[in-house]
DNA sequence: ATTATTTTTGACCGAATAGTCAAGAATAAT
DNA sequence: ATTATTCTTGACTATTCGGTCAAAAATAAT
């Protein structure tokens, strides 16, 4: 008996912070020290909740797919496609699923547009 | 007097190997040990020729832009846009220049297509 | 053949990496 | 209030990271 302490932080909020970090530095470009500093949590809490760095990305990515924040969604989608999918079949499948349900005639142009924006080549409309 | 030894390897060939490595693992996902193994060269030779890991990427990227190998070119372009540009203004400028001279009505669709191919979401035409 | 200059070699370095864990603090259920 | 369970803390580890360097080998020019 005794269910123990409850989590002191809101995983959803933390995953947002982590998501934006990944967008800013890339997946391999983001270290755990970066995540620790950005979230204010310690490694133990992060690992007991998300399991691994990859687990953190997957959770943040999945969250973003169920949200309206298109900035977060597109950013993580790009990182997932280029950096994470090659080393995680699960992430590759998540992208597959997203693509299958979001396929439109202009999807490729949308992706290209997102990448140009992400890299700062274009800023607004054109 | 005495001009000293000549380089024992062909930088162009080496830069191709390095370029494909970056495409396969990403920039931050590729270590110098990876490069050493893939090229057969040792760190000293690589550093005396290219200066740094970033120098290796820039040289491989620049080479690819002057070539016909579209696979290599698109692959490195994607890596450059998403991973390297944020940490190198020089690479950002290279992409800017490329974009300025290659801007077409369907450039965004082309980029999106390249990224979908890179991540294995699509394989051939569609 | 000597020499000045260059490249190659591979051991080495401090810093950063992802991940671990035992001990302590908190708390939900009894 | 006790207790079983959970989360938090932060020090710790082994490994990998990009990069350096002195010595050795090679060679182009004289």
Image: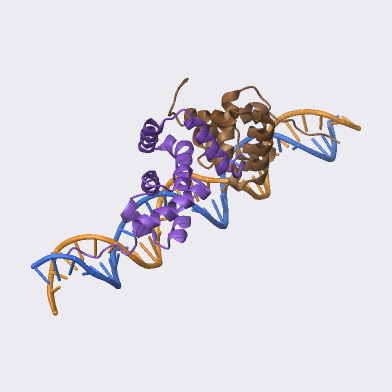
Chain colours: A brown, B purple, C orange, D blue
> Is residue A40 in view from this perspective?
no
Number of disc labels? 0
> Is residue B65 in view from this perspective?
yes
D13 is higher (above) or lower (below) than B99: below
B14 is higher (above) or lower (below) than A34: below
The residue positioned 69% from the left and 31% from the top of the image is: A101
- The part of the image, by quadrant, that contains residue D4 is top right
| Left or right: B51 in relation to A56 | left
Residue B111 image point, x, y percent: 50, 35
The residue positioned 44% from the left and 26% from the top of the image is: A122
- The part of the image, by quadrant, that contains residue A120 is top left
Residue A58 image point, x, y percent: 65, 38
Q: Nearer the viewer, residue B55 or A44?
A: B55
The residue positioned 44% from the left and 50% from the top of the image is: B19
A70 is higher (above) or lower (below) than B6: above
The residue positioned 86% from the left and 36% from the top of the image is: A1
Residue D22 image point, x, y percent: 28, 63
- Which quadrant holds the N terminus of chain B? bottom left
Q: Nearer the viewer, residue D24 or C16?
A: D24
- The part of the image, by quadrant, that contains residue A59 is top right
- Which quadrant holds the C terminus of chain B? top right
Residue A85 image point, x, y percent: 60, 43
| Left or right: B38 in relation to A92 | left
């Amino acid at each position: 008996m005794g269910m123990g302490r409850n989590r002191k932080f809101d995983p959803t909020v933390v995953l947002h912070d982590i998501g934006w970090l990944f967008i800013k530095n890339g997946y391999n470009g983001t270290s755990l020290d970066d995540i620790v500093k950005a979230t204010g949590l310690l490694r133990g809490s992060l690992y007991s909740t998300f399991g691994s760095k990859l687990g953190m990305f997957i959770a943040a990515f999945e969250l973003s797919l169920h949200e309206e924040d298109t900035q977060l969604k597109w950013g993580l989608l790009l990182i997932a496609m280029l950096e994470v999918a090659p080393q995680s079949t699960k992430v590759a499948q998540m992208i597959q699923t997203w693509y299958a349900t979001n396929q439109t005639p202009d999807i490729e142009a949308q992706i290209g547009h997102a990448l140009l924006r992400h890299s700062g080549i274009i800023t607004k409309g054109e």
